[in-house]
Amino acid sequence: MNARAERLSLSGRVAVVTGAAGGIGQATARLMAARGASLVLADLRAPDETLAAIRAAGGRAEALTLDCATEAGAEAIISAAITHFGRIDILHANAGISGPLNPDLTVGAADFAEILRINLIGPWLAIRAALAHLGAGGSIICTASVAGLRAGAGGIPYSASKAGVASLVQNVSCALAGQGIRVNAVAPGLIETGMTAPLYADARARGREDRIGQLNPLRRGGEAEEIAELVAFLASDAASYINGQVIAADGGLSASLPVATRPAGGNPRA
Ligand SMILES: NC(=O)c1ccc[n+]([C@@H]2O[C@H](COP(=O)([O-])OP(=O)(O)OC[C@H]3O[C@@H](n4cnc5c(N)ncnc54)[C@H](O)[C@@H]3O)[C@@H](O)[C@H]2O)c1
C-alpha cells in the first residue's frame, strides 16, 4: 500500500452510519467497507441492500432497523458497534428527511419539530452516545446541506435544521478540545437519492432533465458516491488536521451569489 492509500485506509476501524439503507448513507457505508472498516448500518427501513452489497464484496457489516433519532435508538446503534465489533472509531450521522421542499410560511410546530428531531437532535443523540466510547483518532461526520448555508435550497424547517447541524459540529469539536476526536460536517448540494427522487422524476417527466443542477458552475447534479468520497476522507487519517468544519460538495453552488452568467469568455457586465 502506498503512503496515500495508507492514510485513506480505514482498516481495523469500526464505523456507524445512520440513514444507511440508500442514497448517501449507502454509498458512504460501501466505500468505508471497501477501505477496510467494519460497519454498523442503521435506518428506519431495513438496510438489507447495503448489508448484502458489503458482505458480497467481502466486507463486515451488521444492520439495525430503527428510528435513530430517539435516545434509545441512538444508544442502540452505538451499542451494536461495541457488541459486534468491540469498538467505534467513526460515526456518520447522516439520516435525514427533507419535509416540503418549498418555503412554507404556514408550517406548524409539530411538522417543524419533527424535522428538527430527525435532522438535528438525531445527530446530537448519536454523537452523545458515541462519545462514551470514542477515543483519540475518532472521527464524527454529520450530513448537513447547502440548504443550511444559504436560503433557497430547501424548506424552512429543513434549512434551519441543517444550519443547526453546522453549529453542532462547530460546538462539539470545540467542547472536545484536547481529546483528539475530530467533528466535521459535509454539506451536499443536489444529489440524486431517494430524497430527491420526486424532483428528478418530475424534471424527467417534463423533458427537463437537462435543467437539473444548472444553478451550479459544474452544471450537473451530484452522485451519492461523490459525497461518500468526502465522508470517507474525513473519517480517515488523511484528514487528521480538519476539525470543526462544514465542507460543501455542491459543484460550486454555494460559492456564488445568484448572478446571471454568460458563456466562458463573455463579459458578464455586457
Ligand atoms: N440528496 C440531496 O440532494 C441532499 C442534499 C443535501 C443534504 N442531504 C442529506 O443527506 C442525508 C442523506 O439523505 P439522502 O439524500 O441519501 O436521502 P435518502 O432518503 O436516500 O436517505 C435518507 C435515509 O435516512 C433514513 N431515515 C430518515 N429518518 C430516519 C430516522 N429517524 N432514523 C433512521 N433513519 C432515518 C431514511 O429511511 C433514508 O434511508 C440527509 O441528511 C439529507 O438531508 C441530501
Image (spheres, helix red, strand yellow):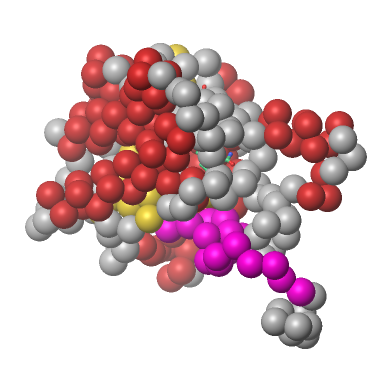
Q: Main secondary structure of the magenta part?
A: loop
Q: Residue furthest right?
A: 207
Asked if residue 250 lies in the magenta stretch, the reply is: yes
**Residue at the (80%, 37%) spot, across then down:** 203
* Quadrant in which residue 21 is drawn: top right
Q: Position of residue 75 (x, y in %)?
A: 24, 21
Q: Report which quarter residue 244 is drawn in.
A: bottom left
| Number of marks in the rendered image | 0
Q: Taking 253 as reference, is 76 left or right?
A: left
For the point 29% across and 29% down, the residue is 121
Above or below: residue 267 compared with residue 106: below
Q: Is residue 209 above or below residue 198?
A: below
In terms of depth relative to the viewer, which is nearer, 163 or 247?
163
Image quarter of residue 73: top left
Q: Is residue 13 visible?
A: no
Is residue 212 rendered to the left or right of residue 35? right
Q: Residue furthest left?
A: 178
Q: Position of residue 169 (x, y in %)?
A: 28, 48
User: Could you say where residue 17 lies in the image, as x and y percent from the top left?
Assistant: 42, 33
Decide if residue 68 is on the left or right side of residue 188: left
Residue range highlighted in magenta: 247-262
Q: Nearer the viewer, residue 167 or 126?
A: 167
Residue at screen point 48% across, 63% down: 5
- Position of the C terminus, as image quadrant, is bottom right
Query: Which of 75 and 40 lies nearest the eye of the viewer?
Result: 75
Is 227 rendered above or below residue 116? below
